[in-house]
Amino acid sequence: MNKRLIGTLGVAVIALAGWYWTQGQPTKDPVSASAAGTSSAVSAAPMVEVMVPAEFSTQAGQGETYYNAVCASCHGADAAGQDGIAPPLVHRIYEPSHHGDAAFFLAARNGVRAHHWKFGNMPPVPQALTEAELGAIVAYVRELQRANGIN
């Protein structure tokens, strides 16, 4: 069989298993009410120092806007995380070879069980985001990662 086909099928099986695993699991959410989409934002110290590129692609620039509206309340400005609230997305744990783009889509749609950090489970993002908006957010995070040596 073609190696690319086998790799693609492997990624699909892992993504499906991750989705299945998160279904029906109780969500322990020690995160503040801001994670649930309310306007009471909590601010904590960033967990990592993030070098922001001078310029983003058009898609990542749009993603920055969506990220700031939906994700920053937990994952912090420039995806630097917030101590005691949520992890940084500009971190080697989230490099594309370990957490592919599909992992970000699944986490936003279905939430994710805590497995790398001790923040508790991430609930699904309560705001309805289109595939294009999620794709733009992922492009933004990936460009931040590349600017910080995470490829």
Image (cartoon, rainbow, N blue to C red):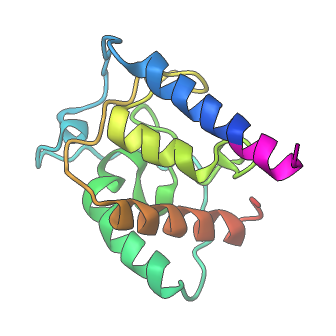
Q: Is 121 placed above or below 150 here? A: above
At which x and y percent is residue 90?
A: 60, 54
Question: Which residue is located at x 42 percent, y 20 percent?
Answer: 22
> Does the stretch in magenta take in 57?
no
Question: Which residue is located at x 87 percent, y 49 percent?
Answer: 2
At which x and y percent is residue 29?
A: 30, 21
Specify the farthest residue to the left: 39
- Is residue 141 or residue 78 the one in the foreground? 141
Residue 132 appears left or right of 14: left
Question: Which residue is located at x 34 percent, y 40 percent?
Answer: 109
- Which picture quadrant has residue 63? bottom left
The stretch of residues the image draws in magenta is 1-8
Does residue 88 appear in this view?
no
Question: Which residue is located at x 37 percent, y 67 percent?
Answer: 132
Residue 52 appears left or right of 33: right
- Which picture quadrant has residue 13? top right
At which x and y percent is residue 131?
A: 36, 60
Specify the farthest residue to the front: 1
- The prevailing secondary structure element of the residues shown in magenta is helix
Does residue 112 appear in this view?
yes
Where is the N terminus found, in terms of image quarters?
top right
Q: How many marks?
A: 0
At which x and y percent is residue 148?
A: 71, 65
Q: Is 132 placed above or below 105 here? A: below
- Is residue 79 or residue 137 the one in the foreground? 137
Where is the C terminus found, in terms of image quarters?
bottom right
- Is residue 37 or residue 20 the one in the foreground? 20
- Is residue 84 or residue 34 the one in the foreground? 34
Q: Is 38 placed above or below 13 here? A: below
